């Protein structure tokens, strides 16, 4: 009888080799790479635009809220796709279950609207 732990040995070895490769490459590139430091090289650079002011200025949490709500409703669509593909096989029970699923999300959407989460000032 074979030991069940030995069945996972190839997977563990693959992870070890992959992690070792990453560590080795990072060390070798850091060790062999050029080390020319200057004020221009250490300066912040993004999209070819010179940095202006402090990068730590706070901005509205509404951006994050809209992103989270987008992900939430996007996941809803992901769950609806398999249901739509198997609509005929699921029958009336599948239709009722999806109706409840959509109803729960609509209650959440109504709550979001009542709280004013999507209103921009």
Image: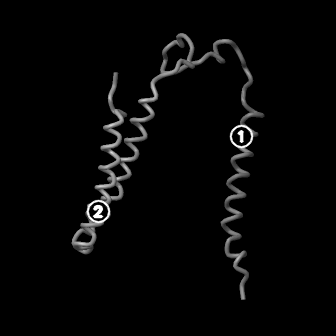
Screen quadrant of the C terminus: top left
Residue drawn where x is 62% and y is 15% of the image: 43
In front of the other: 70 or 111: 111
Q: Quadrant of residue 18?
A: bottom right
Kindly identify which numbered label has been placed on residue 101: none
Give the CA distance from mark 2 to mark 1.
49 Å
> Disc 2 or 1, which lies upstream in sequence?
1
Q: Secondary structure at mark 2?
A: helix
In front of the other: 108 or 1: 108
Q: Residues within 10 Å of mark 2 (few under 14, many from 20)?
A: some
In front of the other: 116 or 46: 116
Q: Is residue 67 above or below residue 47?
A: below
Q: Position of residue 101 (x, y in %)?
A: 32, 59
Kindly identify which numbered label has been placed on residue 26: 1
Residue drawn where x is 27% and y is 69% of the image: 94
Residue position marked by numbered label 2 in the rendering? 98
Q: Is residue 6 above or below residue 29?
A: below
Q: Is residue 61 left or right of residue 16?
A: left
Q: Position of residue 83 (x, y in %)?
A: 29, 64
For this orientation, the residue located farthest to the bottom is: 1
User: Which colour assignment does the render follow?
Assistant: one colour
Q: CB under 8 Å between callouts 2 and 1?
A: no
Q: Position of residue 45 (x, y in %)?
A: 56, 19
Residue drawn where x is 72% and y is 89% of the image: 1
Q: Quadrant of residue 63?
A: top left
């Amino acid at each position: 009888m074979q030991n069940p732990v030995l069945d996972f040995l190839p997977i563990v070895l693959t992870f070890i080799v992959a992690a070792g490769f990453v560590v080795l490459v990072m060390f070798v590139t850091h060790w062999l790479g050029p080390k020319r430091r200057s004020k221009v090289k250490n300066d912040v650079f993004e999209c070819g635009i010179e940095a202006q002011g402090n990068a730590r200025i706070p901005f509205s949490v509404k951006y994050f809220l809209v992103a989270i709500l987008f992900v939430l409703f996007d996941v809803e669509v992901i769950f609806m796709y398999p249901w739509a593909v198997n609509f005929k096989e699921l029958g009336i029970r599948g239709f009722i279950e999806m109706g409840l699923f959509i109803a729960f999300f609509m209650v959440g959407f109504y709550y979001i609207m009542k709280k004013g989460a999507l209103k921009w000032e």
